[in-house]
Image (cartoon, grey):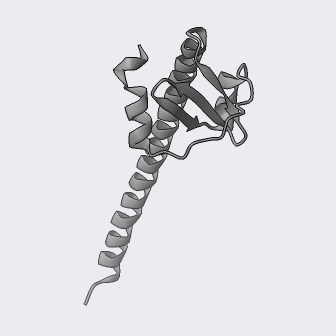
């Protein structure tokens, strides 16, 4: 039979592990948010450069930025907290294509773009 002291020791270990996992979860969530901010900043820069090169880009309701490349349309959603990065864009009026992530990045990485 397990003593009350042993049970308390095990519960203390579990509580310590839970606290450690909670802290790690918060760290990972913060890191994830940071990655999205960085990604959205890169997309905003790419779209601004593309517009200066004569490409069409704009916004669709639901916080989606769309860019027409010679290789096809690409789009990304962004958080409301990042909307200021795209506020200079007009509304995008063409239909939004449904493509896979793999296809999106095939279009973006197409060397014929340059």
In the picture, residue 90 is in which quadrant?
top right
What residue is at 37 percent from the left and 25 percent from the top?
A: 110
Depth check, front residue: 4 or 44: 44
What residue is at 73 percent from the left and 40 percent from the top?
A: 61
Depth check, front residue: 9 or 75: 75
Query: Would you place residue 60 above or below residue 12 in this image?
Result: above
**Quadrant in the picture for the C terminus:** top left
What residue is at 49 percent from the left and 31 percent from the top?
A: 72
Q: Position of residue 107 (x, y in %)?
A: 42, 31
Drawn side of residue 87 relative to residue 28, left or right: right
Q: Looking at the image, which residue sits at the far top? A: 52
**Quadrant in the picture for the N terminus:** bottom left
Depth check, front residue: 18 or 12: 18
Q: How many numbered circles are shown?
A: 0
Query: Would you place residue 25 above or below residue 57 in this image?
Result: below
Q: Position of residue 102 (x, y in %)?
A: 38, 41
Q: Position of residue 94 (x, y in %)?
A: 67, 35
Mark yes or no: residue 47 visible.
yes
Q: Looking at the image, which residue sits at the far bottom? A: 1
Query: Would you place residue 16 above or below residue 82 in this image?
Result: below
Mark yes or no: residue 34 visible.
no
Depth check, front residue: 90 or 113: 113
């Amino acid at each position: 039979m397990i003593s009350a002291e042993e049970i308390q020791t095990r519960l203390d270990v579990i509580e310590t592990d839970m606290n450690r996992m909670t802290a790690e979860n918060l760290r990972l969530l913060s890191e994830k948010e940071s990655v999205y901010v960085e990604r959205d900043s890169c997309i905003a820069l790419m779209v601004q450069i593309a517009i200066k090169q004569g490409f069409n880009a704009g916004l669709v309701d639901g916080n989606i930025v769309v860019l027409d490349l010679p290789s096809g349309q690409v789009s990304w959603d962004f958080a409301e907290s990042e909307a200021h990065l795209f506020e200079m864009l007009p509304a995008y009026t063409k239909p939004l294509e449904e493509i896979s992530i793999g296809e999106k990045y095939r279009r973006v990485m197409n060397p014929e773009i340059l």
